[in-house]
Amino acid sequence: MLDKSADFFKIEDNFAKTKNITSISLIQSKLSFEPQITIAIPTYKRADLLRDTLDSAINQIEFIEYDIVVVDNNPERGCETEKLMNFYNNPRLSYYKNEENIGMFGNWNRCIELSSGKYLTILNDDDILEPNYLKCVLEIVSVKQNLDAIIVGHKVIDSEGKLILKHKIAEPKLNKVIPLDLQLGNVNPGSLGILFTKESLLTIGGYDEKFYPSSDYMFLVKYLAHYDNVFYLNAQLTKYRIGFNESKKIATLQGFIEMDTKIRQSFKIIYPILRKVIDLAQNVIILKQYKALSAASEEFENINSKHIEKLEKDINFFNKIAFKSIPIFCKLIRFKNKL
């Protein structure tokens, strides 16, 4: 449980929490160059899905200076994941197996530590990169000096890989991202498709498991509070798979709402002048989150139906205005700061 006195933006060394647990190197990449980018894949007992994820990482087009690091959180030797990795004979691939399970976000942090590129992206073992992902993000890297991160758009696929949701995009646009952009929720599922600099991830201390199940959301908020050269490219360069992960459990869904609410309250530290607006907008944001999670789980909807009805009744005109004003304040802040 999160301590009420927790400092949301304090930089802590989360890598130190698992430093005594070794990652055994089973396969090492054989490249004749230093990779500019690492695609880091944390995995745990999902060899059937990992194959598609690996293929999407291997089959990148028009960019060659990258490697792929797979970190297996299952200590069991000879497992299906290890068999799959031995099947591949690709010089880009490195494969590590943790001697102990270090937890989901602990494994994300280990991926960061084991990456060798100047830049890295964390790709979960059930998600997909479009073939032109690296090509597109490197085009931005080449023109933006002192870049801290690039966030990209995504499509949503089901457990069979069929497209569920694809947002309509008129033209690809590149916009500066500020912390307030995340007040309405995480702009990205997990860290899917976000290209970070490895140095910044090490400096900020990695992902903090005490914010579970929203550690990735809190991490991005904190990252934006410390690093201001972050851009969003609305091109859909990744595929987010739903239906195969921990986040479908009822307790986890409820945990998302509770933790996300606490995280959104922390925005008042960054934007004290907007404290009242942030407070008034919360019920609308919470209601929308309840409805989104209810669409993903009928059981969750049944459990929370009365609470959802109460939220709908309690929301007033001022709550709605505050909610609608947040994107406007984002634009004003960008205009004021010439972002």
Image: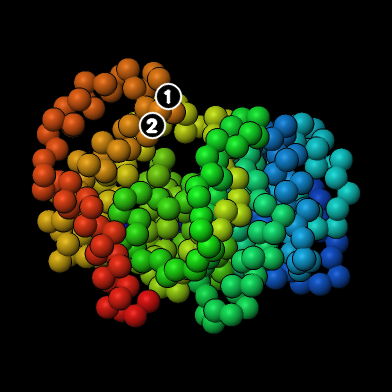
Above or below: residue 156 compared with residue 69: above
Q: Residue furthest front?
A: 170
To which quarter of the image does residue 161 belong?
top right
For label 1, the crowd category at 10 Å Cα-Cα, with few meaning under 14, some 14 to 19 and many 20 or more, is some
* Mark 2 secondary-structure assignment: helix
Taking 111 as reference, is 118 above or below it? below
Q: Is residue 324 above or below residue 38?
A: above
Total number of numbered discs in the rendering: 2
**Residue 125 can be seen in this image:** yes
The relative height of residue 80 versus residue 103 in the rendered view (above or below) is above
Q: What amino acid does circle 2 point to?
A: Leu
Residue 308 location in percent, x, y? 23, 27
Q: Is 39 on the left-hand or right-hand side of 243? A: right
Q: Which residue is mark 2?
A: 293
Cβ atoms under marks 1 and 2 closer than 8 Å: yes
Real-space CA distance between mark 1 and mark 2, rounded to the nearest whole angstrom: 6 Å
In-image side of 80 versus 14 (left or right): right
Q: Nearer the viewer, residue 64 or 39?
A: 64
What is the x, y in percent for residue 128?
65, 46
Q: Quadrant of the N terminus?
A: top left
Is residue 24 or residue 257 the one in the foreground?
257
Q: For mark 1, what is the residue? A: 297
Figure quadrant of residue 334? bottom left
Residue 27 x/y as whole percent? 81, 51
Mark number, residue 86: none
- Name the residue: 69% across, 35% down: 49
Circle 1 SS class: loop
- The residue depicted at 62 percent of the width and 66 percent of the height is 137
Residue occupying the point 65% across, 30% down: 160
